[in-house]
């Protein structure tokens, strides 16, 4: 339940029953995480739900395929899920520190949203495809954005090093 001044009831009021229905509604009770699954199953059925999963997995695999072809990107792990983890390989310097900085650049850019991830102790950029509207074009944009911003960050670091 939630506690807030505006939810407190005067015990003398007409709604001052010890069992306040305000604390029993969806908004103030435990999360109903299964609602999304249930509603989706009701809307598209079990096979439709499976197809949604297959679609997300296919988009994640496309990210992995495209990243694997790029000379500056490294795929940290293949996947049977809709999750992927990759990183940019700068020509010099600490790969982890570089990718931590790149992650911040990606957040600020806003075209794709990746988070931090570790695979076998290696830091990378982790993504998870969970939107039925995601496409192979989104996979291409993701890989190109990481490569573009990684390249720009690498060039920026080189310029800073030359100035010293």
Image (tube, rainbow, N blue to C red):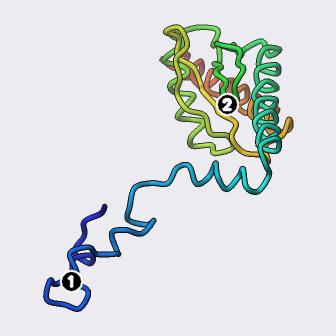
Residue at 67% across / 40% down in the picture?
Answer: 112
Residue at 70% across / 36% down in the picture?
Answer: 129
Coordinates of residue 44 in the picture (x, y in percent): 80, 52
Residue at 61% across / 26% down in the picture?
Answer: 153
Q: Name the residue under label 2.
A: 149
Dot 1 lies on which element? loop
| Front position among marks 1 and 2 | 1
Dot 2 lies on which element? helix
Coordinates of residue 34 in the picture (x, y in percent): 56, 49
Q: How would you rate the neighbour count of disc 1 (Cα within 10 Å): few for under 14, some for 14-19, many for 20 or more?
A: few
Residue 65 appears left or right of 124: right
Above or below — where is 112 with respect to 89? Answer: below
Q: Mark 1 points at which residue?
A: 16
Residue 63 appears left or right of 91: right
Q: How would you rate the neighbour count of disc 2 (Cα within 10 Å): few for under 14, some for 14-19, many for 20 or more?
A: some
Nearer to me, 10 or 67: 10
Residue 28 appears left or right of 153: left
Q: Quadrant of residue 137?
A: top right
Give the CA distance from mark 1 to mark 2: 58 Å
């Amino acid at each position: 339940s939630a506690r807030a001044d505006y939810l407190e009831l005067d015990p003398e009021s007409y709604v001052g029953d010890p069992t306040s229905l305000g604390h029993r509604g969806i908004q103030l009770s435990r999360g109903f995480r299964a609602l999304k699954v249930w509603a989706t199953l009701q809307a598209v059925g079990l096979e439709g739900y499976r197809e949604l999963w297959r679609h997300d997995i296919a988009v994640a695999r496309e990210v992995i395929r495209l990243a694997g072809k790029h000379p500056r990107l490294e795929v940290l792990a293949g996947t049977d899920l809709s999750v992927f983890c990759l990183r940019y390989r700068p020509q010099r310097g600490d790969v982890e520190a570089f990718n931590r900085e790149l992650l911040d650049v990606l957040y600020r850019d806003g075209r794709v949203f990746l988070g931090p991830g570790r695979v076998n102790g290696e830091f990378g950029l982790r993504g998870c495809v969970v939107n039925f509207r995601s496409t192979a074009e989104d996979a291409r944009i993701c890989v190109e954005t990481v490569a573009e911003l990684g390249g720009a960050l690498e060039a920026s670091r080189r310029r800073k090093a030359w100035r010293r």
